[in-house]
Image: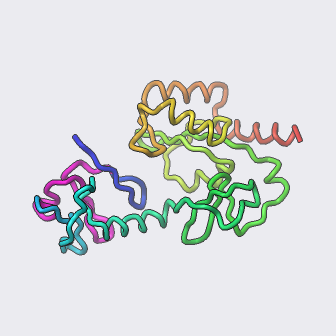
């Protein structure tokens, strides 16, 4: 069965082709066929979105893979950006790690590398104890592989059921793991199917550590000891 992936508040919603989902009074369709029992995009190529039950009459770009007009695509993008942010250059380098890459939210900027809020001033201990890790999070039957220099903050921003493991490493290590498990990757996201070989890799990372946070605290202590 073919699927389209649509990111909404609360995470991605996987929609079977020809299916639909209603969010905040607006119904979004997936695929290029009939949507919602006949109301939506037809052979003429009309938008499948409904607003308060009224179907949109706008045409869909012939090259689009979703049955949504440009206006509603941009509206959906703005909705997603409120929660996941928009990656862009920071107005000025991050004072905590020096990165120029940031994520813009309605409430302000966060550094894309260490998640430090641009308006905050870091103290000396933060800079000394920084440890970059690759994290493995489980949500239902999928696993997210990401990286952070401040996992305590980062993990509170991601919906998940369980922290499976940490691994020492930055974005280069994260990219390496994304390539290693490319066959399990879902679309172009940081989420992966929970295959046996990915679970075996996580089990190796967990060997000798019952709690990933214990590993992280040990690494921070080692970092401080080396100063």
Percent position of residue 224, x then y: 85, 42
The colour scheme applied to this rendered structure is rainbow
Percent position of residue 226, x then y: 87, 38
Quarter holding the N terminus is top left
Q: Is residue 163 left or right of residue 99?
A: left
Percent position of residue 79, x then y: 41, 67
Residue 132 found in image quarter: top right
Secondary structure character of the magenta stretch overall: loop
Residue 210 found in image quarter: top right
Quarter holding the C terminus is top right
Which residue is drawn at the image coordinates 68% and 53% (left, top)?
114
User: Is the residue 188 above or below the residue 55 in the image?
Assistant: above
- Does 93 lie within the magenta span? no
Percent position of residue 177, x then y: 55, 33
Q: How many marks?
A: 0
User: Is the residue 46 above or below the residue 179 in the image?
Assistant: below
- Does 36 lie within the magenta span? yes
Magenta residue span: 14-42
Q: Nearer the viewer, residue 180 or 23?
A: 180
Which residue is drawn at the image coordinates 34% and 55% (left, top)?
6
Residue 35 found in image quarter: bottom left
Which residue is drawn at the image coordinates 67% and 64% (left, top)?
117
Which residue is drawn at the image coordinates 21% and 49% (left, top)?
17
User: Is the residue 117 above or below the residue 160 in the image?
Assistant: below
């Amino acid at each position: 069965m073919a699927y389209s992936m649509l990111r909404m508040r609360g995470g991605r919603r996987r929609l079977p082709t020809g299916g639909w989902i209603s969010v905040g009074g607006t119904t979004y369709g997936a695929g290029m066929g009939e949507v919602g029992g006949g109301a939506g995009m037809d052979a003429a190529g009309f938008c499948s979105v409904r607003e308060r039950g009224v179907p949109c009459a706008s045409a869909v770009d012939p090259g689009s893979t979703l049955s949504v007009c440009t206006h509603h695509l941009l509206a959906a993008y703005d909705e997603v950006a409120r929660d996941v942010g928009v990656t862009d250059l920071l107005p000025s380098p991050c004072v905590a790690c020096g990165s120029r890459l940031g994520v813009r939210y309605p409430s302000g900027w966060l550094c894309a590398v260490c998640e430090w809020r641009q308006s905050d001033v870091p103290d000396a201990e933060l800079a000394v104890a920084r440890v970059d890790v690759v994290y493995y999070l489980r949500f239902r039957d999928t696993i997210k592989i990401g990286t952070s220099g401040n996992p305590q903050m980062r993990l509170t921003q991601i919906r998940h059921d369980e922290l499976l493991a940490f691994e020492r490493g930055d974005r280069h290590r994260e990219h390496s793991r994304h390539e290693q498990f490319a066959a399990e990757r879902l679309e172009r996201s940081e989420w992966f199917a929970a295959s046996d070989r990915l679970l075996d890799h996580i089990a190796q990372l967990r060997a000798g550590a019952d709690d990933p946070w214990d590993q992280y605290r040990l690494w921070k202590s080692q970092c401080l000891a080396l100063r």
